[in-house]
Amino acid sequence: MRKSHLPLIVAIILSFSSCKEKDTTINPISLPDAETILEGRWQLVFTRAEGNARIGTGTFPVSGTNLNTPEGFYELNVGKEENTYSYDVKTLLNMVIGENAAITREYDYNDKDGGTWEIKSDEEVTFYANQGNIQDIFFTKYDSLEVEHLQFAIPVDTVLESVGYKGNVILDMVKIQ
């Protein structure tokens, strides 16, 4: 039997919720020892975007893909007093608006910050950013194989060349430490 050249993946898929109310579209799973799994440096390998555009009175679906190789990382540390994190993410996305891709926009996503994080339960983690944002993260999938893969969905509400965009920038990362 021929072995695949693709690495085996440990998938930890996390969905961010920007509000305090429970998102009913998220089906969290229990992830015992989440602190140990999350600790380390995560290298950005792929980005995409999903959401909606507001043009006039209409709303249209948006999908975005990398225009270049994304750069960046998330680093999560476990401390005696508190857990800390830092990140630096840079990517250029091609945002396709509408079913027929009649409109496109480039989105230069560039964000850098840090803060603290804590495990709320074996289903939920909260990030407290130095810039004031608080984001609740839920574990939605975990599979224990060889390479650890982490996915964050970052809520975004911005304007791209006169087109309002509200959705997520989704970061795919692999653990390197």
Image (cartoon, rainbow, N blue to C red):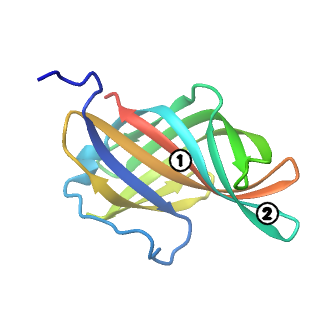
Q: Which residue is mark 1?
A: 170
In the rendered image, residue 162, in percent from the top left (x then y), is placed at 88, 52
Q: Residues within 10 Å of mark 1 (few under 14, many from 20)?
A: many
Q: Which mark is residue 54?
A: 2
Q: Is residue 2 above or below residue 140?
A: above
Q: Is residue 121 visible?
A: no
Q: Residues within 10 Å of mark 2 (few under 14, many from 20)?
A: some
Disc 1 residue type (three-letter): Ile
Secondary element at tag 2:
strand
Answer with left or right where residue 33 lies relative to residue 79.
left
The residue shown at (34%, 60%) is 140
Answer with left or right where residue 88 lies relative to residue 53.
left
In the rendered image, residue 22, in percent from the top left (x then y), is placed at 45, 76
Disc 2 residue type (three-letter): Arg
| Quadrant of residue 31 within the rendered picture | bottom left
Q: Nearer the viewer, residue 165 or 176?
A: 165
